[in-house]
Image (spheres, helix red, strand yellow):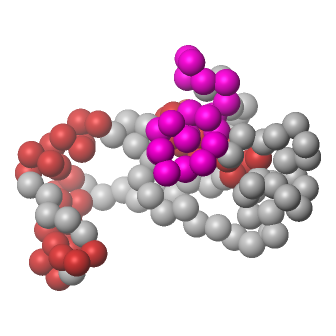
Amino acid sequence: MRSGAGVVLDFGCWSPEERYAIRAIAESAGGRFVLEVVRASEEERRRRARQRWLDHPETTFEMTEADHDRFLAAVRLPDDELAGGPLPAPPDGHATWHGWASERWPTLPDLSPSDTAATGPDASL
């Protein structure tokens, strides 16, 4: 992002907290956050998942109807956070969205901007 190249982060953002965290990381790297929401009917979404499993099982995992129901209950679709207003404070117990993201996704290092020029050539993004 810092080089000016376009970057696509292709993974689910199931909650406002996940979307805010990714936005904070992108913006701290000088990027512009745009969330593209793919909408499909529940029937179509389940059909596509079944078809992916049948066509390319090596690239996905089989989802039972119970899996679909559980995931559907867990997702919180975007609403007013897409308006692009100021970022809210991170969840309680976290000083930054970067720190929250690192805890939420343990393989992601804490990308909090440092006090020493977070936009310089040695920045972590």
Question: Picture coordinates of residue 22 (x, y %)?
Answer: 59, 46
Q: Is residue 35 above or below residue 100?
A: below
Question: Picture coordinates of residue 99 (x, y %)?
Answer: 61, 35
Quick one: quadrant of the N terminus? Answer: bottom right
Name the residue located 56 percent from the left edge and 17 percent from the top edge.
92
The answer to whether residue 97 is magenta is yes
56 or 103: nearer the viewer: 103
Q: Which residues are magenta?
A: 91-110
Question: Picture coordinates of residue 28 (x, y %)?
Answer: 76, 47
- Does residue 37 appear to the left or right of 22 in the view shown? left
84 or 29: nearer the viewer: 29
Name the residue located 63 percent from the left edge and 43 percent from the top edge.
110
Quick one: quadrant of the C terminus? Answer: bottom right
Q: Is residue 32 above or below residue 100?
A: below
- Asked which quadrant contains residue 57, the reply is bottom left
In the displayed orientation, state which residue is furthest to the top: 92
Residue 89 visible to an observer of this rendering: yes
Name the residue located 55 percent from the left edge and 61 percent from the top edge.
9
The answer to whether residue 29 is magenta is no
- Does residue 15 appear to the left or right of 34 in the view shown? left
